[in-house]
Amino acid sequence: MVRVRPVHDADLPIFYAHQLDPVATAMAAFTSAEPADHAAFMTRWRRLLDDDAIVKRTVLVGDDVAGHVIRFERDGQPEVTYWIGRAYWGRGVATAALTALLGEIRERPIFARAAADNRASVRVLEKCGFRVCGHDRGFAAGRGQAVDEVILCLASDAAT
């Protein structure tokens, strides 16, 4: 059973371990420049945890921490992002976690981004009602090169 709850400090070492997975980092593409920099990881998460405007949830499968899902703002627009540990890929965990977060976040439209070739992530977003509404290209630290990106939007009339 997948559920979400507020992030606890005890979750951070697991999130850090997920970030160290080179396959997951390459798949996510748009990651921190130095995923092994623990101090930078902790600084980022302290900032996230201290900001009440950011909704951050730990994703649980049973009692196990499987990842996180977050609602934040980019350029004044609400956006969601998530990271699911590779051991949980292909099991519907990301879709269930994002669905749970979207149940809490009623604002629409809301946006998301994914590397254009990350079909699994794009599919998760589509299952949650997002539709491609734009394209971008930017440097992806997780791959060390520029990568095409899709921008997706969940409009106010979409079912979640």
Image: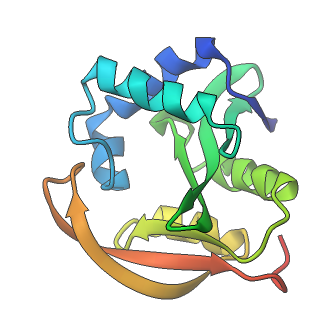
Q: Residue at x 60, y 38 (%)?
A: 68
| Residue 23 on image: x %, y % | 30, 42
Residue 134 horizontal side relative to residue 68, left or right: left
Out of 61 and 13, give the one closest to the viewer.
Answer: 13
Quadrant of the drawing holding the N terminus: top right
Instruction: Name the outermost residue toward the top.
Output: 10
Residue 100 horizontal side relative to residue 34, left or right: right
| Residue 31 on image: x %, y % | 33, 47
Q: Residue at x 56, y 48 (%)?
A: 82
Q: Is residue 31 above or below residue 121?
A: above
Instruction: Name the outermost residue toward the left.
Output: 145
Q: Residue at x 77, y 74 (%)?
A: 108
Residue 157 horizontal side relative to residue 110, left or right: right
Residue 55 horizontal side relative to residue 138, left or right: right
| Residue 95 on image: x %, y % | 69, 56
Quadrant of the drawing holding the C terminus: bottom right
